[in-house]
Amino acid sequence: MYEYKFIKIELGKWNSKPKEEYQDIIHQYANQGWRFVQIFAPATLGYGSAAYFELIFERPLS
């Protein structure tokens, strides 16, 4: 069995850049025993880009 964690990263409205460095978040959670699984991007908004994406992590239940 595994447990999962979902970290939402907001994107800028005008430049679509992440408001946080996702690489830093991946390293931070890896140091806590989480394994990075996937970046999930939701459906795009009316102007063609997503408002956020989610980092998905997993680790075995202890």
Image (cartoon, rainbow, N blue to C red):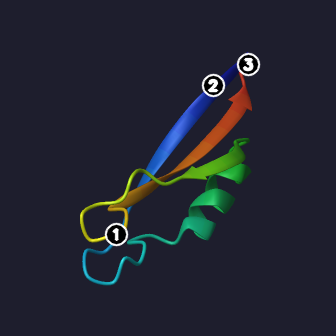
Q: What residue type is labelled 3?
A: Ser
Q: Which amino acid does label 1 sit on?
A: Gly
Q: Distance between the residues labelled 3 and 2?
A: 9 Å
| Residue at 28 percent of width and 61 percent of height | 45
Relative to 1, is 3 above or below?
Answer: below
Q: Where is residue 31 in the image (x, y as percent from the top left)?
A: 72, 52
Kind of element beneath mark 1: loop
Is residue 2 toward the left or the right of residue 5 in the image?
Answer: right
Q: In which quarter of the image is residue 18?
A: bottom left
Q: Position of residue 6 (x, y in %)?
A: 50, 41
Circle on res. 48: 1
Confirm or deny contact between disc 3 and disc 1 (CB under 8 A).
no
Is residue 46 toward the left or the right of residue 5 in the image?
Answer: left
Q: How far apart are marks 1 and 2 (CA)?
A: 33 Å
Is residue 42 toward the left or the right of residue 15 in the image?
Answer: right
Kind of element beneath mark 2: strand
Residue assigned mark 2:
3
Q: In which quarter of the image is the N terminus?
A: top right
| Residue at 55 percent of width and 66 percent of height | 22
Q: Quadrant of the C terminus?
A: top right
Q: What residue type is labelled 2?
A: Glu
| Residue at 65 percent of width and 49 percent of height | 38
Residue assigned mark 3:
62
Residues packed near mark 1 inside 10 Å, few (<14), some (14 to 19) or many (20 plus):
few
Of mark 1 and mark 2, the one earlier in the sequence is: 2
Residues packed near mark 3 inside 10 Å, few (<14), some (14 to 19) or many (20 plus):
few
Residues packed near mark 2 inside 10 Å, few (<14), some (14 to 19) or many (20 plus):
few
Q: Name the mark nearer the viewer: 3 or 2.
A: 2
Of mark 3 and mark 1, the one earlier in the sequence is: 1
| Residue at 63 percent of width and 25 percent of height | 3
